């Protein structure tokens, strides 16, 4: 299950995107949020990874 929250971040030379994914812990069953800053082209691949 992924929560697709994407914010555009612009730096001086590169365009970056911050993506937040909700991941379920196999040990406790609780959900945690994993954040990552990456190029916009990589967001869908990162969200589809398990």
Image: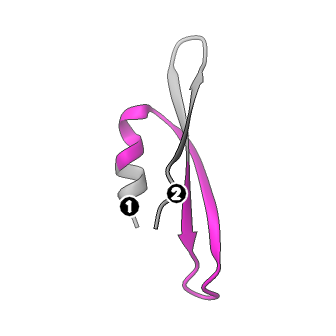
- Residue placed at 62% from the left, 73% from the top? 31
Q: Horizontal and vertical percent for residue 30?
A: 64, 80
Q: Which mark is residue 49?
A: 1
Residue 19 lies in what quarter of the image? Answer: top right
Instruction: Determine whether, in the image, residue 39 is placed left or right of residue 21.
Output: left
Span of residues in magenta? 20-44
Q: Which mark is residue 37?
A: none
Q: Horizontal and vertical percent for residue 11?
A: 60, 17
Q: Is residue 48 positioned above or below 37 on the image?
A: below
Instruction: Determine whether, in the image, residue 44 is placed left or right of residue 8.
Output: left
Instruction: Name the residue carrying label 2.
Output: 3
Q: Is residue 26 magenta?
A: yes
- Residue placed at 47% from the left, 61% from the top? 2
Q: Quick one: quadrant of the C terminus?
A: bottom left
Q: Disc 1 on helix, strand or loop?
A: loop
Q: Is residue 7 positioned above or below 13 on the image?
A: below
Distance, label 1 to label 2, CA atoms, is: 13 Å
Q: Horizontal and vertical percent for residue 24?
A: 55, 75
- Residue placed at 49% from the left, 50% from the top? 4
Instruction: Determine whether, in the image, residue 2 is placed left or right of residue 7.
Output: left
Q: Nearer the viewer, mark 1 or mark 2?
A: 2
Question: Observer-nearest residue: 4 or 28?
Answer: 4
Q: Is residue 35 magenta?
A: yes
Question: Observer-nearest residue: 27 or 22?
Answer: 22
Q: Is residue 15 positioned above or below 32 on the image?
A: above
Q: Disc 2 on helix, strand or loop?
A: loop
């Amino acid at each position: 299950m992924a929560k697709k929250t994407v914010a555009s971040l612009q730096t001086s030379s590169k365009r970056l995107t911050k993506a937040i994914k909700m991941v379920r812990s196999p040990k406790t069953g609780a959900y945690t949020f994993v954040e990552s800053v990456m190029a916009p082209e990589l967001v869908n691949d990162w969200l589809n990874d398990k």
